[in-house]
Image: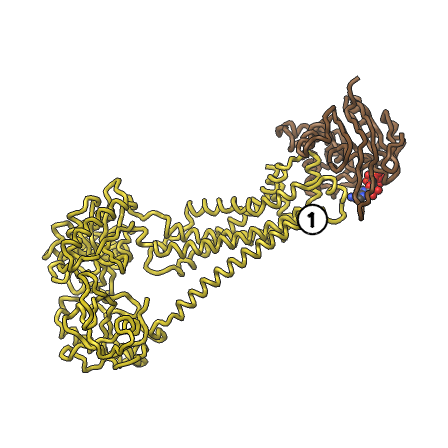
């Protein structure tokens, strides 16, 4: 207790030193606390669902891609044949145009079609109303919707009479039957859930080699491990591969914990960040240790006297450690304030679409982390100088009185070592930062293959019943293009099935005359369907051949444009323009009409 | 008769000078101090009096020879063992007081107790007792820099005896005191001595030396009497 009082007095006595030390520590501990709060919120915090460790994402996989969306017939077989899952659901994310509400302009809503047991997989029950039943979830079933808490708030101001209201999604009148609780964030950012089975009479869904963007959601039976589930699912998939070699050869299955699926991508970069801020803190510690050692040398007489009147070495070390601890705690408290203040910045910097990043909070774990960190730092920067100071030679320190410092050559040498360590750590940090910057710069200069400057994109979804007819679609897009191009300030406009760099649609691909590969081994490529002005609009130069033109209608021989990468891979050393290939979207061979620059490489 | 409480044999202390030369501060000191002695060490400035006292107080370990304290061979002990022994047996009054600047008078007196096994009540009682005895109750919340040299001297003497050591080593304890106060300190020493405390003091004053039962003369590092 006396030590504590004295420590405070000592720190008050030299406000300059105290201020520098506290600020250094606040920055170091604050940065660590901030990053830890992100790591906690994103990687460590359990999902807000019951028994979240049992939630799995199940996808198909092959040698090229670890995760592919699930084909509907495969899902049906998986669900029937497995013994490891308590519930096994699928979902498909879609956007819907919401309309039909009074005093509200139509808007685009992110939604999902899911199997009825999807909610059982998640384990949450609606806060209002009910979810749809297995009976409702069928071809020809009723048009019902379960909405999110956010949508309830936004559209209905939490009106409890929302149940039974009719809302148009994609021009079809759906009845709201339930409202999910606020923590429901699956599939990510979705605001409305519909029965999936209504759609399954479509031939596309029933084809086994079509993968229509479905993702499997499963809840492990109690006591079943991820490994065991994966092993059994692999057997099931292997059986399907044998049974349906045309579609399923080489296709296996992946079972990933839901949390890992959501945040696994961020683990490496978050750990890197943590490593960087830990390094910063270490540098700060080395710095402070040096300051404290110099201070200890200046206070040599005090400790000589203390030793002479009875202080043991440990008692002196303890006193000095308490001083460091006070510094670290004050620094830590200030650091916590910095972290709290930086929270909004971190949230703003975080990737969109991962709700967990928005949940940053200074909760008990984060507080415990920064407290523990304060203790550890206080020992890190305090122990070494305390050790040295406590070794002071009493008679030397007392006799020298005011005559200079009692700093021994040894102490000075180890202080030099500390400075060297500090410089080394700084260099490590700087070079690591340099590497990160360089890879960032590399990513930037990678060459997108298009010019993002002044390029705007927008997404259009047309409700399927009203636009089922192809001519209607053509008319719509023609009208849209005409209106867009007429807008003042618009130079070019084009339509594409997916914007550049976005994973779209894949198709098998085989150059004419190439040997027929084994089933399931057909090369597959990313594809995009675009209108005539597309390359001109995104400023991608055509290397050879010609662009798509208005004359390339469906009555003309089909043409494609390939990128440089594909041309070099499938037509090495040859002129790709004019070659014919076979693709799964149509059986006819098509002619290359051109070749764009290396693009879409992600 | 029991062995002397302090026994020095061929004790030498030197500082190395440039080029392998040595400066001897203490040379071949042979000295016995009996338990209950009140010894005064006298001699001209620079004779090595303070140096000798620091050896006795186990602040200085860079000497050679033999040093027995109560039959314990100090020259064979490790630094830590010496420190333990020092805390148990010895109170030290420094020539230039060496009070802790950042502690009040009260806290300066409390410090030796805080490093020993006393509880809070015992410590309070002992400190108040000492404040009383040295007539410095009114100064208890002042810092050393707010005291005169003489007052600091008083506090440092009080600090040396507060934990009731068996031996008090005092380096010119009355150097800065008025002769009345000096007389009072000497009477106090005499009283402690009568109670069984062994006292070794360094003094330039024949009068102060008169309170003791023995005088040791030191000159150029030699004991001359
Ligand atoms: N660190 C040192 N290095 C070299 N010589 C030293 C050192 N400390 C003390 N001395 C020398 O040792 C000698 C004895 O010093 P000491 O302090 O013991 O004298 P003293 O008898 O106490 O004198 P005074 O009456 O002035 O206090 C002096 O000549 C002094 O210069
Ligand atoms: Mg002296």
Q: Residue at x 22, y 61 (%)?
A: A94
Residue A580's place in the image compared with A440, above or below, is below
Split into quadrants, the picture shows ligand 1 in the one at top right
The quadrant of the image that shows the N terminus of chain A is top right
Q: Residue furthest left?
A: A140
x then y, percent, for residue A47? 32, 48
Nearer to the camera, A270 or A77: A77
The quadrant of the image that shows the C terminus of chain A is bottom left
Residue A509's place in the image compared with A34, above or below, is below
Nearer to the camera, B137 or A425: A425
x then y, percent, for residue A160? 22, 52
Chain seen in yellow: A
For chain B, the rendered hue is: brown
Asked if residue A98 can be seen in this view, the reply is: no
Secondary structure, mark 1, is: helix
Q: Is residue A514 left or right of residue A543?
A: left
Nearer to the camera, A10 or A429: A429
Q: For residue A103, what is the image quadrant?
A: bottom left
Q: Which residue is mark 1?
A: A409
x then y, percent, for residue A143? 14, 57
x then y, percent, for residue A332? 51, 49
Q: Residue at x 69, y 44 (%)?
A: A300
């Amino acid at each position: 207790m006396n030590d504590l009082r004295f420590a405070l007095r000592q720190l008050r006595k030299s406000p300059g030193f105290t201020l520098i030390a506290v600020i250094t520590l606040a920055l170091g501990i604050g940065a660590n606390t901030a990053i830890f709060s992100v790591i906690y919120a994103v990687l460590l915090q359990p999902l807000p669902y019951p028994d979240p460790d049992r939630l799995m994402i199940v996808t198909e996989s092959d040698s090229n891609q670890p995760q592919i969306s699930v084909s509907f017939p495969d899902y049906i077989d998986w669900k029937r044949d497995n013994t490891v899952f308590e519930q096994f659901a699928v979902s498909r994310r879609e956007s819907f145009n919401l309309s039909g509400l009074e005093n509200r302009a139509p808007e685009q809503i992110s939604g999902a079609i899911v199997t009825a047991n999807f909610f059982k997989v998640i384990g949450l029950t609606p806060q209002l109303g009910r979810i749809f039943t297995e009976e409702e979830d069928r071809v020809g079933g009723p048009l019902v919707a379960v909405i999110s808490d956010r949508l309830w708030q936004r559209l209905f101001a939490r009106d409890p009479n929302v149940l039974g209201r009719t809302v148009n999604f994609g021009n079809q009148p759906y009845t709201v039957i339930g409202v999910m609780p606020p923590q429901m964030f699956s599939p990510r950012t979705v605001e409305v859930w519909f029965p999936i089975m209504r759609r399954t009479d479509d031939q596309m869904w029933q084809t086994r080699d079509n993968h229509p963007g479905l993702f499997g959601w499963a809840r492990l039976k109690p006591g079943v491990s991820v490994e065991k589930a994966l092993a059994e699912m692999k057997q099931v998939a292997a059986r399907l591969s044998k049974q349906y070699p045309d579609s399923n050869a080489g296709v296996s299955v992946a079972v990933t914990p839901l949390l890992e699926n959501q945040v696994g991508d961020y683990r490496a970069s978050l750990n890197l960040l943590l490593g960087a801020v830990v390094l910063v803190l270490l540098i700060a510690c080395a710095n402070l240790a040096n300051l404290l050692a110099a201070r200890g040398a200046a206070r040599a007489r005090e400790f000589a006297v203390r030793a002479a009147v009875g202080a043991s070495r440990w008692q002196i070390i303890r006193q000095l450690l308490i001083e460091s601890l006070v510094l670290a705690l004050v620094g830590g408290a200030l650091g916590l304030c910095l972290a709290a203040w930086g929270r909004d910045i971190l949230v703003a910097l975080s990737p969109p679409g991962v709700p967990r990043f928005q949940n940053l909070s200074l909760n008990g774990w984060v507080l415990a982390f920064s407290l523990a960190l304060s203790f550890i730092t206080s020992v890190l920067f305090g122990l070494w100088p305390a050790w040295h100071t406590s070794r002071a030679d009493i008679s030397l320190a007392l006799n020298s009185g005011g005559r200079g410092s009692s700093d021994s050559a040894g102490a000075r040498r180890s202080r030099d070592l500390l400075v060297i360590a500090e410089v080394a750590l700084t260099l490590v940090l700087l070079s690591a930062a340099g590497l990160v910057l360089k890879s960032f710069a590399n990513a930037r200069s990678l060459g997108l293959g298009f010019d993002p400057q002044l390029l705007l994109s927008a997404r259009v979804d047309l409700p399927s019943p009203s636009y089922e007819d192809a001519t209607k679609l053509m008319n719509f897009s023609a009208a849209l293009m005409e209106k867009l191009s007429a807008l003042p300030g618009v130079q070019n406009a084009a339509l594409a099935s997916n914007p550049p760099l976005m994973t779209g649609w894949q198709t098998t691909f085989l150059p004419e005359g190439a040997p027929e590969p084994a089933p399931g081994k057909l090369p597959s490529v990313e594809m995009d369907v675009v209108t005539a002005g597309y390359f001109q609009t995104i400023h991608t130069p055509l290397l050879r051949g010609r662009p798509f033109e208005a004359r390339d209608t469906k009555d003309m021989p089909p043409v494609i444009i390939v990128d440089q990468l594909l041309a070099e891979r499938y037509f090495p050393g040859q002129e790709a323009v004019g070659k014919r290939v076979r693709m799964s979207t149509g059986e006819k061979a098509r002619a290359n009409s051109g070749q764009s620059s290396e693009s879409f490489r992600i | 008769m029991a062995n002397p409480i302090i026994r020095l044999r061929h004790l030498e202390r030197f500082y190395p000078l440039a080029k392998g030369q040595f400066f001897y501060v203490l040379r071949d000191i042979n000295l016995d101090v009996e338990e209950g002695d009140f010894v005064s060490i006298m001699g001209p400035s620079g004779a090595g009096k303070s140096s000798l006292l620091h050896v006795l107080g186990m602040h200085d370990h860079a000497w050679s020879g033999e040093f027995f304290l109560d039959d314990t061979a100090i020259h064979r002990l490790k630094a830590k063992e010496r420190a333990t022994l020092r805390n148990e047996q010895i109170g030290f009054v420094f020539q230039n007081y060496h009070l802790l600047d950042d502690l009040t008078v009260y806290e300066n007196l409390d410090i030796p107790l805080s490093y020993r096994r006393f509880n809070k009540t015992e410590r309070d009682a002992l400190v108040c007792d000492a404040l009383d005895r040295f007539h410095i109750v009114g100064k208890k919340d002042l810092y050393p820099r707010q005291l005169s040299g003489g007052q600091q001297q008083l506090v440092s003497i009080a600090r040396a005896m507060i934990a009731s050591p068996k031996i008090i080593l005092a380096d010119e304890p009355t150097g800065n005191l008025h002769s009345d106060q000096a007389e009072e300190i000497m009477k106090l020493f005499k009283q402690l001595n009568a109670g069984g405390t062994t006292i070794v003091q360094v003094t330039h004053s024949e009068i102060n030396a008169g309170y003791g039962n023995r005088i040791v003369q030191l000159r150029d590092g030699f004991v001359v009497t």
